Image (tube, helix red, strand yellow):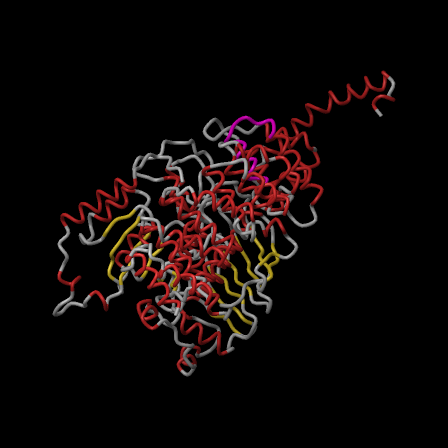
Amino acid sequence: MARKNGINRRTFLKQTAAAATVFTIVPRRVLGGPGHTPPSEELTKAVIGVGGMGRGHLRYPGARLLAVCDVDRGHLNEVLAGTEDYVKGYTDFREVLERDDIDIVHIPTPPHWHALIAIAAANAGKDIWCEKPMARTIGEGQKVIEAVQRNERMFRLNTWFRFRDDFYDFGSKVKPIKQVVDSGMLGWPLKVVVGKTTGFTFKFQWSGRTDLTPQPVPEELDYDMWLGPAPYKPYHPHRVHQTFRGYWDYDGGGLGDMGQHYLDPVQYLLGKDDTSPVEIEVDAPQQHDDAVGSWRRITYRYADGCEVILDGAGTDEGAAYIEGPEGKLFQKFESDITGLKEKVDALPDPAPQIADFSESVRTRKKFALNESNGHRSCTLVNLGVIAVRLGRNLRFDPDAQRFIDDEGANRLLHQPMRGPWHV
Amino acid sequence: MIQKMKPLTLGLAAWVAGLCAPLAGADVAAIVAQFPANDATAANALFEALLDEGDDAIEGLCDQLVPLGAGDDNGPRYALTGLARYVSRPGAEEDREDVEEALLEALEDEDNAEVKQFLLRQLQQCGGNETVSEVDDLLLDDATASHAILTLDAIGTRKAERTLTKALKKTTGTTQIQILAALSDDGRNRTAVNVIEDRLEAQPEADEYVHLLSLLVAFQGNKAHGALMDAMDREEARCRKAALSHASTMMDTSAVKKWRKKVADGDTSDEVKREIGGLLASAE
């Protein structure tokens, strides 16, 4: 593929490799020995994309970092300066996947790369720790599932509220909420309203700009590789790195960035891990061709009448809450059901979940949030993105995973990739 | 009908048209000034008003487009993007055809590559076979080929597939690979396979070779084992690893036999034999 910015990747890699050969002193813990876990018993990892979220992934416990990769040589050098000498830097993820000594590949790249790298990693026999949203389109998510399962890989999506930490909006862990929902105390169907606490419109990186004047590509950035499967558009610094989320080609603004954090635990609470809504209603301003704008409200309705409402504008004063015909659950586990907190103690625990990805990798048992349920909660994000972009309500067939009688919407299920990239 | 009109009637018609034309232009400008609309109801009313103004109004919007960085054309861009999405809704076939036709007219008259790319993106959303017929030439122009391929890929009809397949024979390099990638979801395609085999035969550099192998597997499935075995003769480890990775996903009894034969081949180096041994061990 043509490289548009003149970076000589091979020279860079040769230099990196040569430097590693000359200066690397392998630490004792790498070789094993008293008090140290030998490498053969230790999981190893690579992090692909180290400009933003990837910096966090470097520190996630459970596996030893062996490689980092970024198409921006500036990011790569910054990270390599702070890691052990045996950590090698790459500018092409495919060279990372060729290494036999890496068990887990982290993918905190922008979302337009998630599916491609996840599929390539699965085909290369790696287990995968992928940032949210899982895929840029519903079609790409389906292909990730196929590749992960065909290759019998373990997959973890990087949001955690269904199994750990207080759920942003509810100010409570999900487990007791799940117990209440499963008990039937609230009745059925349920209406869940989330999104008010942090909203989806205020962060600068969530809205694109409509006045981008083309700029020269910085020498350290391989812009063609950064774009990858996305359509070629002239470079502007606002299009890449932290602010990429504001452009439809790479993400879906606040909905893409934060939507799965909110929607995944709700999907779990409602027991919708293997299905999707049948109707999507949207209230949003008209959207630009390229730049993501704001939105106010997205309502997802399931076949059984359950509703999930993303309150982006923060207009629902009572949010967040879960409401059924027989009771309502508010933030901090408050409720109109008398003595709820005491009643929960007597309720059975939800089905156990594997909440440590290392355990999942070692035992080959699925992680709590894996490729299948991750795809379904990412589908909520992508359904919302499509409805916002089109500015119309949609009907969806959750089994066929296609819109009903709307070929215009179906065109956004599988957005074409710029070759040579394909899934 | 015009030929049958009397001169006086024609004169009157011209006078009326002369009065109305500036009024229509002012109406369109007033509509465009209201974009972006704050909600779907307001946006849809504006789209209906634009459609009522006819094809000329839409083409007039296209005339107002300027390349990125050359001025503020957000009004027309919001209007055209919104229209392309609006007419892609169910039950709007006639409106869709009108907008498609206007966008195609504008595409033909446009010289600037970035504006052409914008118009092609709108046709990704609302174009049909009429678009397929009109964008052949753009596949042969480096400035528009990539976006034209994405547009045909999004339209996704048999006619689009045939057009891309025909273009394979007229293109080379990156454009040809982009077309192969666009076709790779559509199942078997003899022309595409021939193109890939020819390019592999020429032993391109490793990056391209690995992409071509991946595309061949997409088109041929387990019939690609022969090409994957040929890849084991490449010096670069990444070519061999790519081949083994593809092979490992489709190892049946017949494939195991073929790969064993490759190991038994006297020309195969010990290193490659070890690599293939790993593939066979995991298959068994």
Locate residue A354 relative to residue A392 in the image: left or right: left
Q: Which residues lie in the magenta part? A: B108-123
Locate residue A318 relative to residue B50 in the image: left or right: left
Q: Is residue A108 on the magenta stretch?
A: no
Locate residue A110 relative to residue A413 in the image: left or right: left
Residue A95, position in %: x, y?
A: 32, 50
Location of residue B277 with respect to B181 vertically, above or below:
below
Location of residue B7 with respect to A375 vertically, above or below:
above
**Residue A130 makes an appearance in the image:** no
Location of residue A71 with respect to A306 vertically, above or below:
above
Q: Which of A212/B205 is in front?
A: B205
Location of residue B23 with respect to A155 vertically, above or below:
above
In the current view of this chain or complex, which residue is farthest to the front?
Answer: B266
Q: Quadrant of residue A304?
A: bottom right
Q: Which of A295/A28 is in front?
A: A28
Residue B162, position in %: x, y?
A: 61, 44
Residue A274, position in %: x, y?
A: 51, 68
Q: Residue at x 52, y 38 (%)?
A: B147
Residue B275, position in %: x, y?
A: 32, 59
Q: Quadrant of residue A355?
A: bottom left
Q: Quadrant of the N terminus of chain B?
A: top right
Locate residue A327 relative to residue B98 in the image: left or right: left
Q: Which of A299/A138 is in front?
A: A138
Name the main secondary structure of what is drawn in magenta: helix
Q: How many marks?
A: 0
Q: Which of A176/B277 is in front?
A: B277
**Residue B59 makes an appearance in the image:** yes
